[in-house]
Amino acid sequence: MRIVTRPDFDGIVCAVLISEAEKITETIKWVEPHEIQNRLIEIKEGDIMANLPFDNRCSIWFDHHESNRIDSTYTGSFKIAPSAAGVVFSYYKGKIKRDYTQLIKETDKIDSACLSMDEVLHPEAYPYIILSMTVSNRSVTKEPYWNRLVDLLMKHNITGVISDMEVKEKCRAVIEENKVYKTVLSEHTVVRKHVSVTDLRSYNKAPEGNRFLVYSLFPEAIVSVRIRHDDPGRQRIAVSVGHNIFNPKCRVNVGKMLSKFGGGGHKGAGACRFLASKAGEYIPQIISILIENRPEE
């Protein structure tokens, strides 16, 4: 039996809960949603998938993204909820012995971006938030750290997790990374009417940082678009879109919109990936829809 999940904080917590509730016999498989959508990953009987689009080859499936809703029969649970971890926790409540109530509460808040301005500007003061920022889904070389976090969260409370030497170093690196990222955002973002567009295609490897920071820097924007190359060969583009959590006037359902461009997500946030040759067609369409700011009828 194997866990297949996404390498973000929600996916980490899903793995913690499933590991508590089921007899997992194989190493966690960390994958991105587009790898499932494009059938790039072998899914097999016995796999428990969480925080990912449905694949009919799995045995159990959990998710909470509106764009991933399905009509077919499956074992598991799907709900429109703040986090996939919350869906998993509710499903396995009778089988999980440790008290993960606070962890689920914090995961719900982080994954649904229900944060205060102080939490965005000073994440180092909030242990769950800074911990979530150490989880990057950009490189498989980070898999040992993702697995380590699953193990730590199963054994320790947040104080114990944050005290781990490797986690401490990751948190320190995130704080420095966020300082640099603030400058990057200022230099590479333009606001088109009420849409902030951060184009990082000039970088071979786009800088990473606090994904909520853009909302504090460009408060007049109601939605953000982040564009970057998705591979070293610059053959694919990744576009991330998010409603401004401090200026909630965007009416576009991001997950549904991006599903038309090979992606998906929540009502308020999502991402898509496509061939670089499609950028000239897809990116203007995405920005135009956001500028129009009309809810899907």
Image (cartoon, grey):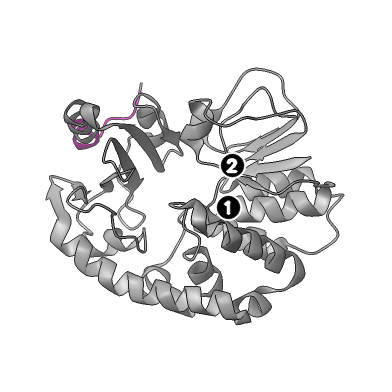
The residue nearer to you, when weighing 197 against 229, is: 229
Residue at screen point 81% across, 46% down? 25
Residue at screen point 39% across, 76% down? 175
- Give the x, y percent position of residue 2: 74, 41
* The stretch drawn in magenta includes residue 16: no
Task: Identify the image quadrant of residue 80.
Answer: top right
Report the amino acid beneath label 1.
Asp
Q: Quadrant of the C terminus?
A: top left
Q: Is residue 94 left or right of residue 57?
A: right
Relative to 33, residue 214 above or below:
below
Q: Which mark is residue 10?
A: 1
- Give the x, y percent position of residue 254: 37, 36
Q: Which residues are magenta?
A: 288-296
> Dot 2 corresponds to which residue?
51
Residue 198 visible? The answer is yes
Residue at screen point 86% across, 49% down? 94
Report the amino acid beneath label 2.
Asn
Tag 1 secondary structure: helix
Label 1 close to label 2 by CB (< 8 Å): yes
- Give the x, y percent position of residue 72: 66, 17
